[in-house]
Image: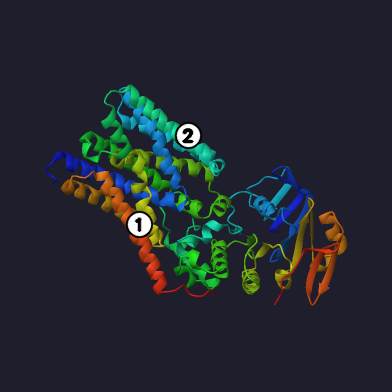
């Protein structure tokens, strides 16, 4: 199947994006900010369709909007904590705007489906290189802030006392999430970003309580689910995005069940 | 001198926590920080950590102005739900604080690893650290977080409500452990609590906060009707029964004591 050029591109793109999504997602789940990933992808939709309208590649519009959204969310920080209504309104407004931009664009339906649900089989070699550059940039930034980010995610008050600037760190991290989200949209689309970014990371945290293993497992699971989805799509002719979300959901369910069963067999020790 | 406040006025969210307060905490001293809810126990600790600037006056820590990231201070924030429900191994959480403020990949150096092992060993929590933090009992969790506060061998410990949500037996265990560490490592300790009795046996002095004022002295000097009436701004009676102390406003008990073993 790899002698088809479009499949080779799809496998390369899926590998790059899934590793980035798995690692970023691990921190996202740890910080309890999973909704941010979802929100950013919606905000990105209006950017992507707007870019199409102006004759620019959708990826650049997507990147611009997710980055702006991520930085804004980071700066607002705590003030966004209990603003579900406000966030929801901004999200639906973004999707609505995206819809409007599509209305003015003629090649309407296929473009919309590709953005909303992903079109990994349509990824060009040039996009693969762009994704690689994006991923390397994001991972380099994540490697730089990894240690303080972990500390601040688990124990913010203590980290602050030790001299970590929580706000600056939060903004930097959400900017990285924004890049990762834009990359994810190329594979699974705006609506299914959760499947690649949150699914594998949450599964990994069910399976191990160690940080190092958790990070490796999150990246590994994301890669396995993305490639597995492509293989299944190739042989069934069903959409790859469906298979990726199905594998991601199944892995999370299995991990949760295994943990529950394990706990039932081996009850928690009584407190000492 | 571990902590010196002179002429300090401290406000938080428009409320005055301290008004022109001055006192000093001595070396190797175990000081209980008490006061009604909202009296500013946490705010005072944050000011000593340099996270909050006083409006007026100065706070010195070991003779130097209070500043963020002072390695001479070990801090244990009041436990909120986040670390308690976390599916992360205790060791990973404790070790996260070793050089955790420095940029770079997660993971720690061999020297930090030895430091973590020392701290876990000294509070006898090496075995606990292998388990996820969320599966530990409250007392076990506090023991791990205490080990974390000792990383970097500080000379001053700020412990914010370490007894909160612990049952009396575990409260006693935590107090005894802190007292033992304080004597063995020659530390100055500020230990905040909303109830005096569990810490009564371990205290050298008590710092009572209330109504923008602070009173520092021995229990017999500070926990008296006249002093507390001034801090609470209401008539307060203090009664001693069987080595326990009850603080009461009129007919109603203000700070009731748990059993003290």
- The residue to which callout 1 is attached is A252
Can the viewer see residue A9?
yes
- The residue to which callout 2 is attached is A90
What is the number of the mark on residue A161? Answer: none
In the picture, measured across the screen, residue A100 lies left or right of residue B147, that is left
In the picture, measured across the screen, residue A130 lies left or right of residue B49, that is left
- State the residue at coordinates (59%, 53%): B70
Q: Classify mark 1: helix, strand or loop.
A: helix
- State the residue at coordinates (31%, 56%): A250
* Residue placed most toward the observer, B85 or B140: B85
* Whole-percent x, y for residue B95 in the image: 48, 61
What's the chain of the residue with tag 2?
Answer: A
Separation of residues labelled 1 and 2 (CA atoms): 29 Å
Quadrant of residue B39 within the rendered picture: bottom right
* Whole-percent x, y for residue A186 in the image: 29, 38
- State the residue at coordinates (36%, 50%): A23
* Whole-percent x, y for residue A108 in the image: 29, 27
């Amino acid at each position: 199947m790899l002698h088809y050029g479009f499949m080779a591109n799809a496998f390369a793109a899926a590998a790059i994006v899934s590793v980035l999504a798995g690692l970023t997602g691990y921190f996202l789940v740890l910080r309890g900010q999973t909704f941010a990933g979802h929100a950013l992808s919606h905000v990105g939709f209006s950017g992507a369709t707007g870019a199409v309208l102006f004759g620019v590649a959708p990826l650049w519009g997507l990147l611009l909007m997710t980055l702006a959204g991520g930085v804004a969310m980071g700066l607002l920080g705590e003030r966004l904590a209990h603003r579900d209504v406000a966030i929801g309104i901004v999200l639906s407004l973004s999707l609505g705007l995206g819809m409007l931009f599509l209305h003015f664009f003629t090649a309407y339906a296929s473009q919309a489906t590709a953005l909303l649900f992903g079109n990994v089989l349509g990824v060009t070699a040039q996009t693969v290189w762009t994704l690689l550059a994006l991923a390397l940039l994001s991972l380099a930034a994540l490697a730089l802030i990894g240690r303080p980010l972990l500390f601040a995610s688990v124990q913010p008050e203590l980290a602050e006392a030790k001299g970590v600037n929580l706000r600056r760190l939060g903004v930097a991290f959400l900017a990285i999430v924004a890049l990762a989200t834009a990359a994810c949209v190329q594979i699974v689309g705006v609506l299914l970003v959760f499947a690649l970014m949150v699914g594998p990371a949450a599964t990994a945290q069910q399976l191990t309580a160690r940080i190092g293993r958790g990070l490796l497992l999150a990246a590994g699971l994301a890669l396995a689910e993305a490639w597995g989805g492509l293989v299944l799509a190739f042989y069934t002719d069903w959409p790859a995005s469906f298979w990726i979300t199905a594998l991601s959901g199944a892995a999370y369910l299995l991990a949760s069940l295994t943990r529950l069963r394990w706990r039932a067999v081996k009850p928690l020790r009584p407190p000492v | 001198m571990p902590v010196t406040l002179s002429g300090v006025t401290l406000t938080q969210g428009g409320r005055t926590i301290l008004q022109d307060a001055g006192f000093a905490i001595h070396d190797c001293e175990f000081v209980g920080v008490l006061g009604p809810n909202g009296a500013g126990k946490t705010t005072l600790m944050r000011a000593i950590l340099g996270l909050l600037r006083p409006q007026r006056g100065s706070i010195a820590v070991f003779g130097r102005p209070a500043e963020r990231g002072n390695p001479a201070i070990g801090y244990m924030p009041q436990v909120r739900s986040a670390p308690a429900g976390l599916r992360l191994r205790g060791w990973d959480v404790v070790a996260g604080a070793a050089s955790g403020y420095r940029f770079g990949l997660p993971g720690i150096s061999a020297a930090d690893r030895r430091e973590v092992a020392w701290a876990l060993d000294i509070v006898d929590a090496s075995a606990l650290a292998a388990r996820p933090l969320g599966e530990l009992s409250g007392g076990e969790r506090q023991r791990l977080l205490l080990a974390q506060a000792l990383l970097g061998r500080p000379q001053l410990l700020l412990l914010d409500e370490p007894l909160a949500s612990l049952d009396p037996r575990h409260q006693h265990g935590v107090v005894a452990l802190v007292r033992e560490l304080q004597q063995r490592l020659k530390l100055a300790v500020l230990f905040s609590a909303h109830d005096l009795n569990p810490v009564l046996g371990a205290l050298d002095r008590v710092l009572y906060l209330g109504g923008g004022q602070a009173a520092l002295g021995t229990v017999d000097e500070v926990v008296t009707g006249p002093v507390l009436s001034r801090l609470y701004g209401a008539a307060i009676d203090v009664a001693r029964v069987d080595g326990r102390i009850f603080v009461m406003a009129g007919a109603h008990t203000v700070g009731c004591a748990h059993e003290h073993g």
